[in-house]
Image (cartoon, rainbow, N blue to C red):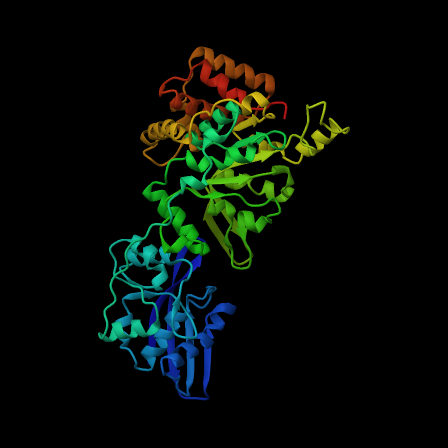
Amino acid sequence: MVARVNTVAFAGVEVRPVDVQVQISNGLPAFTIVGLPDKAVAESKERVRSALHALGLSLPPKRLTVNLAPADLSKEGSHFDLPIALGLLAAMGVIPKGELEEYLVLGELSLDASIRAVAGVLPSAIHASANDHKLICPKACGGEAAWAGDIDILAPSDLLQLINHIKGTQVLSRPEAKLGEALDERRVPDLAEVKGQETAKRALEIAAAGGHNMLMIGPPGSGKSMLASTLPGILPPLSPREALEVSMIHSLAGSLPEGGLLQSRPFRDPHHSASLPALIGGGHKVKPGEVSLAHNGVLFLDELPEFARSTLESLRQPLETGNALIARANNHVNYPARFQLIAAMNPCRCGHLGDPDLECNKVPRCAGDYQSKISGPMMDRIDLQVDVPRVEIADLNAPAGESSAIVAARIAIARDIQAARYNGTAVNAQASGNILEQIAQMDEHAKTLLDAAMEKARMSARSYFRILRVARTIADLSGNPDILNKTHIAEALSYKRASF
């Protein structure tokens, strides 16, 4: 007789059902797991054996076979421990077999039979809800599973609690839905703390309002990193749909805080030594990279030219498509990666290009070599390219500027305009060509200016449409939802460095 338990495997954000089949038969004592398990799954038999021993149960001296079907699907992760243990308990007659048919089960077992948190509970719960299953998951993950909808969820802290509930001697209540820690404004610098840099502040506001990519270029200490760090304080909060999308990715990565749904937009700032798999995703188990962890949020790359050339070039496809496709010989995994790129760099290696008192004696060759590390196609995908000059003494002594709260209010109004325009599914930076022709119509003077600038600077078609998207955002911030005028186009053009 075979005992069956439902669980899942993951291929990117896709959840695939797995049937855990357990058989106890006569023969030499052995415990075998088949079905293409990885090392973590193969080791689960020792964790299961020890967990059952902690409950006073011993495995029978027979041949134990666990099959993870389908057999040609790779099984990775420690979340198979609990389904295997429940399958063995059902096969041994400790719990009724029929009790497990309606449940989808995942969890890692400790040697003392406690159930540890695992990655991927939120997408698993959504899959269970879509397939009319109930869910058994670790107690630490119950808060995220509860967001999947009105499904029955058991979240025991150890295996004994679960057995007692199944037998009817204990009742486990449904876990409450949790929210992750909200954005703590005390830890996010306020825009008013940034001295001077009014042009860069304006560009940052436009970038936040329309979801545009932005590059800040300036000498060391001019405030580029601080400007970027203020961005979480002016971005609008995640919508419920966006929060669910982002939390699913962080759940798969095992980085969802305290088992709750994320409330604030991700802000990822990897070091420039980050490898290509760390940035895009990959590795042995094809985990999501920084671009996917920044989905619906911000990816900040400081010291942009110091990143490896191949790593930077790998950003081109996610920036265009909003997805990170990781190809392997035996598998293709796709993670969402619709992020906003904010980057910062020095104008040259010494960082003081244009300052006769500080620049090195290799100018202008060192500047050309340093800037050439960023390819033309990569620069073409950046909407706003802003100079951040050295801060003058007069700026340091000037009164504080607008606070993040004031700027965030204007951005929220512009985002509301875009939500109505795109039915809440996009921002201006994501507007497709056919929609852009309708929403970014120009008057005669604006069209003449843009055509002349395109011809003089020999810009690409991609640059043309990106300028229109930026101009559309500028118009939204000014409260003009209709025709783009010469002022909107002129400001959008001022953020394109044709000489770079």
Left or right: where does residue 97 sit relative to residue 82?
Answer: left
Question: In the figure, residue 112 lies in which quadrant?
Answer: bottom left
**Where does residue 488 sit, x and y in percent of width and height?**
45, 18
Residue 491 visible in the displayed image: yes
Vertical placement of 65 versus 461: above or below? below
Picture quarter with the C terminus = top right
Vertical placement of 481 versus 79: above or below? above
Vertical placement of 243 versus 484: above or below? below
**Where does residue 338 sit, x and y in percent of width and height?**
45, 41
Left or right: where does residue 249 sit relative to residue 151?
Answer: right
Question: In the figure, residue 145 lies in which quadrant?
Answer: bottom left
**Where does residue 437 sit, x and y in percent of width and height?**
41, 23
The residue located at (24%, 63%) in the rendering is: 173
The residue located at (48%, 29%) in the rendering is: 204
**Where does residue 44 sit, x and y in percent of width and height?**
46, 73
Question: In the figure, residue 3 lies in which quadrant?
Answer: bottom left
Q: Residue furthest top?
A: 445
Picture quarter with the N terminus = bottom left
Closer to us: 197 or 448: 197
So how many labels did they put on this image? 0
Residue 207 visible in the displayed image: no
Left or right: where does residue 353 sit relative to residue 327?
Answer: right
Q: Residue furthest right?
A: 361
Closer to us: 331 or 379: 379
